[in-house]
Image (cartoon, rainbow, N blue to C red):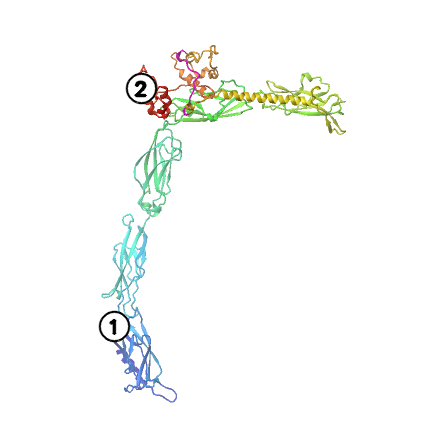
Amino acid sequence: IKIEKRPKCHEVMLVVPLCFVSFFLSKSLRRAKRGWVWNQFFVLEEYTEQKPLYIGKLHSDMDKGDGSIKYILSGEGAGTTFTLDDSTGDIHAIQRLDREVKAQYVLRAQARQRETGHPLEPESEFIVKIQDINDNEPKFLDGPYFATIPEMSPIGTFVIQVTATDADDPSYGNSARVVYSILEGQPYFSVDPKTGEVHVSLADMDREVKEQYHLVIQAKDMGGQLGGLAGTTTVNITLSDVNDNPPKFTKKLYQMSVLESGPVSSVVDRIEAKDRDLGINAEMRYSIIDGDGRDTFDISTDASNLYGVITIKKHLDFERKRSYTLKVEGSNAHIDPRFINKGLFSDVTIVHVSVEDVDEPPEFEYPFYYVEVPEDAEIGTILTMISARDPDVANSSVRYSIERMSDPDKYFYMDITSGSLITVLPLDREEVTWHNLTVLAMEMNNPLMIGSVSVAIKVLDVNDNPPSLTQYYEAFVCENAQAGQLIQTVTAIDPDEPTGGQHFYYSLAPEAANNPNFTLRDNQDNSAWILTRRGGWSSQTQNIYYLPIFVSDGEQPVHSSTSTLTIRVCSCDVDGNVLTCLAEASILPVNLSRGGLIAILTCIFILFVMLMLMLTLQRHRKKPYLTNEEENVHENIVCYDDEGGGEEDTEAFDIAALWNPHAEPVRYAKLRQDMLPEIQSLSRYVSQTCVGGVSEDGSNVYSYMLTKLYEADLDPSAPPYDSLQTYAYEGEGSVAESLSSLQSPASHSDHDYDYLNDWGPRFHKLAEMYGVIESKSNIW
């Protein structure tokens, strides 16, 4: 067969794709022609029969059919997927073929001599291609899908694009041609059949009505024709919020209350304008647009930007105004201009605030008091009147006092009823210039309500101190000093501080006005010079001189003092430097020796020791001797040496003074014999105008008694002569009950004291006194 027969062979291949044609090539002198030609083989995938699938046949021109030629197959799948009959050259497929797994196989074939294995032809290569069938449905590799779009989106708004892939061969038929459609989700959304794009198909979808949408989209191959394979996926679409709803208050009228004592900026209550939108679209702004309380209250938005918080802007006063009305507007903070045609995105409500009464402490007339008083003010001087009132409706009476820590030395007294501030001790500016008091005002009906105010008292200076020399001066004069020589400069000080400054005047005391030795010159600058009047000084003649100096101030009344300047006569060199100064020697009497002085001191020491010994013995003698029985009684024995005389005791206190406080105080015409009174009455310091007039029925005794009680409280050394003890609840809570004799029987003969033994060891002594215990053995 010659080479021209190739077209015929190609024609046969188009009709029967599983055949192959071999050409025998003859050898020439110049080149060798091949004896066979390999072509492509085609086989359908997914072959399901049990017997092997015949693919094609290998044949060489040298094959005589006697079995001397052996065909060999190698390459992809040789021996596993494809088998070859080495005698006939038939090729079969022994496994199921899948184009989507492997689309083609490259194989090699060779003809060899069976006995020698010598190759008869060179090795040639051929391809087995797997033809596609529609055996794969479209798949959505990225499903399920999720998408979000704004609510109220117009028709045609793009949502998302879905994509399905088909594993079949897109170049062979319509097996991989996919068409999209919606199975669930109409009429809200639609899908493009070719691209898979999802769009909005229904306008004005409202998130507040429905927020989530579930779509099922199908992808079908074969162009959507009948018999095509299909796959589905889901698309979950969420509508995001936009500001398309105006806010609305939950109430048209809010009722709330607040205590009048509420501090500024404290919270009264909250209000809310609800918005169906979410997030930033629901954020609110609140404002007070009208009402009589717009200057008293304020409103702000809380941290969540949802609630309006009403706070106090100014101090509240129940007695001045008991209720307020507020007109509050709530509006969206972020308005979408696309929906402005729907109307105002705001709402208005009314808030009624009631102020509740609180028991407040007394309020003073002034927030601060300043008083000036001269330091020479007399005791009992009224400095000022402190006034306070109860701001509540009850208007309770007020009692005044001074906070103890602000006046520890008790210079002042406060009248408890009138509020008069009075001096009770002398004032001295040089000791304390300022007194800062805290005055308390207490309600009588509620002692817990106490107001306070600061009172600053400045003590004004009065010229009440004499000037004196700045220090102790001691000068010296040289023996060679001449007349008119300066030996000392002196200055003075004065604790007072006059307005125009200090002005001191110096001179020699009258007794030294004609001193022949020294003179004084006033420099008119608050200093003075001491000058010599003569020369020729000698320490042997007199070595110490005392010069009295008179100093006075320039204020009224004029005060003065006299100080002594000590001047020593010393030996000096030519430059005036001191060489020696002789001091006065201590001269002992001529007839007193040193041994006698020692004897005198020894006697004095012995007398001192004897005196101390006598005092010690006397102190031990006063200590009472205690028996063992008395020492075992662990009780405190209080001795009252001063026993009251009852109603007949008229020496201790005169009740008539209570009924007539205007009377001149009695100067103790009749004093107690056992104890002299130690309390000096404050009534001589307290002005009768502070105490007030006394009515005929003695109604002002109460105020006078309070004054006297305050006097006793201020004096820590006063004995409790006038103390009032109340025993209205004596004996309650005690196993002994009441020991009062008021309810005891008139006769003690039939009284049984055996119960004292049941009260414990503390009452053994009392039981023994009443004869209940017969012997000591019974006690123990």
- Indicate the quadrant where residue 21 lies: bottom left
Q: Secondary structure at mark 1?
A: loop
The reply to whether residue 395 is in sight is no
Q: Earlier in the sequence, mark 2 or mark 1?
A: 1
Give left or right: position of 144 versus 295: left
In the image, residue 292 sits, relative to residue 751, either above or below, namely below
Crowd around label 1: few <14 · some 14–19 · many ≥20 (10 Å): some
Pointer 1 residue: 47
The residue wearing badge 2 is 752
Q: Amino acid at mark 1?
A: Tyr
Q: Is residue 559 above or below residue 18?
A: above
The quadrant of the rendering that contains the C terminus is top left
Q: Residue at x 30, y 58 (%)?
A: 144
In percent of width and height, residue 442 lies at 40, 24
Q: Is residue 217 visible?
A: yes
Point out residue 25 in the picture as x, y percentages from the top left corner: 33, 86
Nearer to us in this view, 385 or 196 = 385
Q: Assess disc 2: are there few (<14), some (14-19) or many (≥20) residues with their C-alpha within 10 Å of its C-alpha.
A: few
Kind of element beneath mark 2: loop
Q: Main secondary structure of the magenta part?
A: loop
Question: In this rendering, which labeled residue sits more in front, label 2 or label 1?
Answer: 2
Above or below: residue 309 compared with residue 108: above
- In the image, 254: left or right of 497? left
Q: The magenta stretch spans which residues?
A: 632-648
Give x and y (percent) for residue 360.
38, 27
Q: Nearer the viewer, residue 243 or 643?
A: 643
